[in-house]
């Protein structure tokens, strides 16, 4: 390590940067250095445990839905349900797929309405009481609010990206592990697989409770000061504060850019509801099995993790790309991938499309990082809650649209779902282009106030 290089660490959850000269002069031991590096690890394991739980059962869950629809809804026997991809069962397969697709539509609506309502209250409440309780509740938006609270402006994009990598790394490992557990260990038991899922979620809660701090800046107050916990959370002022934060005037047209960045997050997350439809698509068109699709998802998600880990630091730190250029690249690659998906008649073309799709996730951390730079620390929870609303509100619309498009085109053009994805990613590209040509970097940074408050270590009694 040269004298020009430096080491960033956290003291009391506050990032500091020291050169190697400091370590030579202070005589700090390697043990102390390792401890400083370990102090940098905060919410990353929480994200990993949460996402590993979901990834282990992600493809298994899709197979489970088809199995139940076939056996229960349509009352077919095991011989037919285990061989739906056979040519003689093509019409039956389509009927089962329509049932599963319709289930996804209502599942998306039911699963996100409550989260939308909670998000309006949660952001302002977390700004006042801390990020830990939302994390214990499994609200992953709090992960990004927590990491932006404790990171410096210079390192924020990198730190947010690392959290995204923790999310993405669990995808290939979780899917691959889920395939092995399902086929080799649990004897294809759905009950055992979902028990493993619940156990990992429990580990995430335990780690978050033990490791993370209740408050991440000095303006947050302990929950013990609240007279009534219920009314403290479900306070109408929280909604007013959240909406006011988004709507209030800001210098350099920052309010406008904040709003369209939130809109771009909504358009970007639209493609997530394509995933369950894609499982149906490849089973119908390419006659893929559970194992074949698991291998493909492992390949794509492994590439995603590597690219996200390398691409953003390379593009932002080495080539000095603006965040908007990175957004444009990600949206473009998502669109190109869907062209390959829609036209693929053999498996290897889907893998080519997967290589482009693996670049797409660079969009999300850049949007979150840019949003966090526009607002002061005291408003980040509210803003991230609106991002969570955008994230959770979209499936209410996208889930319905993907289902209706797939059901309507299953007999003629089942690949139509991919053109819906292309349309939304074109909107992300257009928003990034607009921001790029109408702003300079300094216009997207909050002008005063500390961007990194010192964490108060005191625990709630």
Image: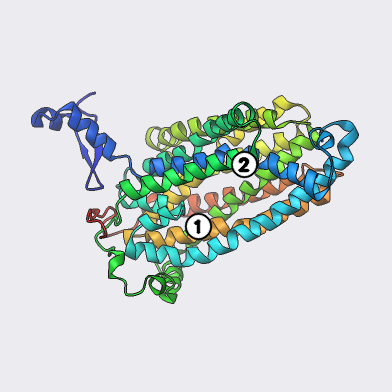
Residue 363 location (% of width, % of height): 51, 44
Q: Residue at point 80% right, 35% down?
A: 285
Residue 7 location (% of width, % of height): 24, 34
Counting labels gives 2
Q: Distance between the residues labelled 1 and 2?
A: 30 Å
User: Residue 195 is drawn in which quadrant?
Assistant: top right
Residue 93 location (% of width, % of height): 83, 40
User: Residue 181 is drawn in which quadrant?
Assistant: top right
Q: Is residue 435 above or below residue 294?
A: below
Viewer-side residue, 72 vs 245: 72
Are circles 1 and 2 on residues that touch, CB within 8 Å?
no
Residue 109 location (% of width, % of height): 65, 59
The answer, for residue 91, to whether it is visible in the render is: yes
User: Residue 352 is drawn in which quadrant?
Assistant: top right
Q: How crowded is mark 1: few (under 14 residues within 10 Å), some or many (20 or more)?
A: many
For the view shown, which residue lies furthest in the right direction? 88
The residue singled out by tag 1 in the image is: 388
The residue singled out by tag 2 in the image is: 191
Viewer-side residue, 271 vs 173: 173
Front: mark 1 or 2: 2
Tell me which label, 1 or 2, sits earlier in the chain: 2
Q: Residue at point 49% right, 34% down?
A: 169
Q: What element carries label 2?
A: helix
Viewer-side residue, 407 vs 441: 407
Viewer-side residue, 215 vs 258: 215
Is residue 70 rendered to the left or right of residue 115? right
Is residue 13 rendered to the left or right of residue 115? left
Q: Is residue 227 above or below residue 384?
A: below
Q: Residue at point 46% right, 60% down?
A: 385
Is residue 56 rendered to the left or right of residue 47? right
Q: Is mark 1 on a helix, strand or loop?
A: helix
């Amino acid at each position: 390590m040269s004298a020009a290089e430096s080491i960033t660490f956290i003291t009391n959850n506050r990032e500091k940067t020291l050169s190697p000269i400091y370590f030579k002069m202070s005589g700090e031991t390697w043990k102390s250095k390792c401890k400083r590096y370990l102090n940098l690890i905060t919410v990353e394991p929480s994200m990993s445990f949460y996402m590993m739980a979901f990834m282990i059962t992600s493809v298994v869950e899709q197979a489970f839905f088809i199995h139940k629809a076939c056996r229960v809804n349509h009352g077919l026997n095991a011989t037919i349900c285990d061989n739906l991809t056979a040519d003689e069962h093509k019409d039956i397969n389509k009927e089962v797929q329509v049932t599963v697709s319709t289930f996804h539509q209502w599942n998306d609506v039911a699963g996100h309405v409550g989260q939308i309502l909670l998000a309006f209250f949660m952001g302002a409440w977390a700004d006042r009481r801390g990020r830990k309780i939302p994390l214990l509740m499994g609200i992953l938006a709090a992960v990004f609010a927590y990491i932006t609270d404790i990171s410096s402006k210079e390192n924020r994009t990198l730190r947010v990206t690392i959290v995204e990598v923790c999310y993405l790394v669990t995808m290939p490992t979780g899917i691959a592990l889920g395939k092995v557990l399902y086929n080799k260990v649990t004897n294809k038991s759905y009950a055992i697989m979902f028990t493993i899922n619940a156990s990992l979620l429990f580990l995430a809660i335990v780690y978050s409770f033990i490791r993370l701090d209740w408050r991440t800046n000095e303006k947050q107050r302990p929950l013990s000061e609240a007279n009534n916990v219920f009314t403290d959370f479900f306070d109408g002022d929280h909604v007013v504060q959240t909406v006011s934060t988004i709507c209030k005037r800001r210098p350099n047209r920052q309010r406008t850019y904040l709003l369209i960045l939130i809109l771009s997050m909504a358009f970007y997350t639209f493609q997530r509801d394509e995933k369950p439809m894609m499982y149906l698509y490849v089973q119908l068109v390419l006659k893929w099995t559970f194992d074949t699709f698991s291998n493909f998802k492992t390949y794509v998600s492994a590439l995603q993790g590597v690219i996200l880990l390398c691409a953003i630091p390379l593009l932002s730190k080495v080539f000095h790309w603006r965040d908007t250029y990175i957004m444009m690249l990600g949206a473009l690659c998502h669109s190109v991938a869907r062209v390959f998906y829609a036209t693929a008649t053999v498996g290897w073309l889907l893998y080519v499309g997967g290589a482009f799709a693996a670049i797409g996730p660079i969009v999300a951390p850049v949007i979150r990082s840019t949003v966090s730079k526009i607002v002061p620390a005291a408003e980040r929870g509210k803003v991230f809650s609106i991002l969570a609303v955008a994230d959770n509100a979209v499936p209410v619309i996208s889930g319905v649209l993907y289902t209706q498009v797939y059901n309507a085109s299953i007999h003629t053009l089942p690949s139509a779902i991919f053109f819906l994805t292309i349309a939304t990613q074109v909107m992300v590209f257009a928003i990034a282009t607009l921001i790029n040509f109408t702003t300079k970097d300094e216009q997207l940074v909050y002008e005063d106030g500390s961007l990194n408050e010192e964490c108060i270590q005191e625990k709630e009694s």
